[in-house]
Structures are given as structure tokens and as C-alpha cells.
Image (spheres, helix red, strand yellow):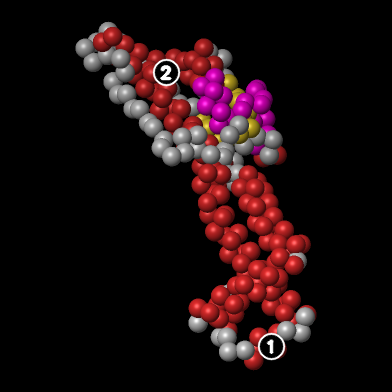
Amino acid sequence: MASRLLGIIVKEFIHLKRDMLALVLALAVPVGMLFIFGWAINTDVKHVPTVVFDQSGSVEARLFLEAMENSQYFAVHRRVGSQKELTRLIDSGAAKVGVVIPPDYARRLTRQEAAIQVIVDASDPQVATSALNAATSLGAQRSLQVLTQTLEGTRLGRQGEPPLDVRVRAWYNPDLVSAIFIVPGLIGALLMQTTITAMAVSVVREREKGTLEALIVSPIRRWELLLG
């Protein structure tokens, strides 16, 4: 069995050596597709178009909006003067996220009762999930800052230290680049596709040259031929 399989492998290498175009295609196409798909299939969600309806106009509201933009998840493109205009921009697709800040935001924030409405276009679930998670995280961070300011000077918050310090470290892919996760899987998929294509081309080549009948009557088994 090993000798028959080795014979098929040697024969294929001889064919590739004589047909340089097939050799180039066998090597260049998978590498090219790997680069194209690896960077074209990008699931990183950043700079989501955002529209803001700020009824407060306070320093606290501005700090929250600056935190949104600094997160790189949101990109505030427009500020509108009405809820109707905000809804129109989301309906038209000009914005994916809408932020509504109430007029009494600053006053309620000092009483720890503030609320901000975040409207997300969920037609793209991946973008919507990332935007919702980012907005929730920003809200939690702002709440912690307010709580820290409230506790300053007390026994629990002496020296201005926050009551809870959560330090998160991302291992193996600290920049959260989707290509690092996608490319290894693409290698396996492209190898499988290339192998099947090369196998089909080899069989067609044998038929075109009239040597397929010689392979059929040879003592080699079908699976040995395909594997070789």
C-alpha cells in the first residue's frame, strides 16, 4: 500500500514540476485568499455613528459624551435639538446609536438618580451588542466615579480611593483584533478547499491526457488514488 501511495505522490509532483501554472495557482491562491479574507472579514466594532440629543447642556453631560468618544466605540457625528430629529436619523441609517440626555441630568446625578437613554439600531446584531455593552460599561464607570466622589472624606472613601478597583487584563489578544481569531480557522478551511480543488483538477487532467483508464485498471485502490 505504501509503495502504491508513494508512486501516486511522486507522479503528482512530476506533473506540478512540468506545469508551473498549476504550481503557482496551488500556492498563490490559498495565500492570497488568506490575506484577503483575513482582513476583509473584520468583526471589530469601532467608531459607531452616534447622534446626541443633549437637553442638559451641563458639564456632567459633556464629560459623559467625551468618555463615549474616547472609548473609540462611538463617534458623535451630530447633535440634534429634538427627539423627532434623532429618530429620523436612526431610521434613515445615518446613525446607529442615539443618546438622549434629560434636562435635569446634572441635578439628578448628584442625587444618584440620573438616567440616560441610549437607542441602538439592532438591525446589525453584532454592532448593536457591542454598542450596548460599551454603553453599559461607560454607565457603570460613571456611576463608580460619582460614588467615589460621594464617599470622599468618609471612612470608606478616605484618600479619594474608589471603593472597588477592578483591573482587567486581556491575554493572548490584548488589542481584541478579530483577525487573530479568524485567520487560524481560515487556514484550515482554505487547505480543505484547495485540496479538494487540486484533487478534482488532477482527475480531470488524467482524463484529458487519456491516462485515466490506465489508473482505473491499475492495482491501486480508489482511496489511495484520492489520497495520493
The answer to the question of whether label 2 and label 1 lie on touching residues, with beta carbons closer than 8 A, is no
The x, y position of residue 186, in whole percent, is 57, 54
Residue 103 visible in image? no
Q: Residue at x 42, y 18 (%)?
A: 109
Report the residue marked by disc 2.
Answer: 109
Q: Foreground mark, 2 or 1?
A: 1
Tell me, yes or no, whether the highlighted magenta stretch contains residue 69.
yes
Whether residue 157 is situated above or below residue 51 in the rendered picture: above
Sequence-wise, which precedes: disc 2 or disc 1? 2
Q: Residue at x 72, y 58 (%)?
A: 24
Residue 214 numbered tag: 1
Q: Amino acid at mark 1?
A: Ala
Out of 220 and 7, give the one closest to the viewer.
7
Real-space Cα separation, disc 2 to disc 1, in angstroms: 85 Å
Residue 179 coordinates in the image, percent (x, y): 56, 44
Extent of the magenta region: 66-90
Q: Is residue 1 magenta?
A: no
Q: What percent of the width, then of the height, locates residue 91?
A: 67, 40
Q: Is 223 drawn above or below residue 119 in the view shown?
A: below
Furthest toward the bottom, the residue is 217
Nearest to the observer: residue 174 or residue 133: 174
Residue 76 versus residue 127 in the image, above or below:
above
Mark 2 neighbour density, 10 Å: few (under 14) some (14–19) many (20 or more): some
Amino acid at pointer 2: Leu
**Residue neighbourhood size for the residue with mark 1, other residues' Cα within 10 Å, grouped as few (<14), some (14–19), many (≥20):** few
Which quadrant is home to the C terminus? bottom right
Q: Secondary structure at mark 1?
A: helix
Q: Decide if residue 37 is on the left or right side of residue 2.
A: right
Q: Position of residue 193 (x, y in %)?
A: 62, 64
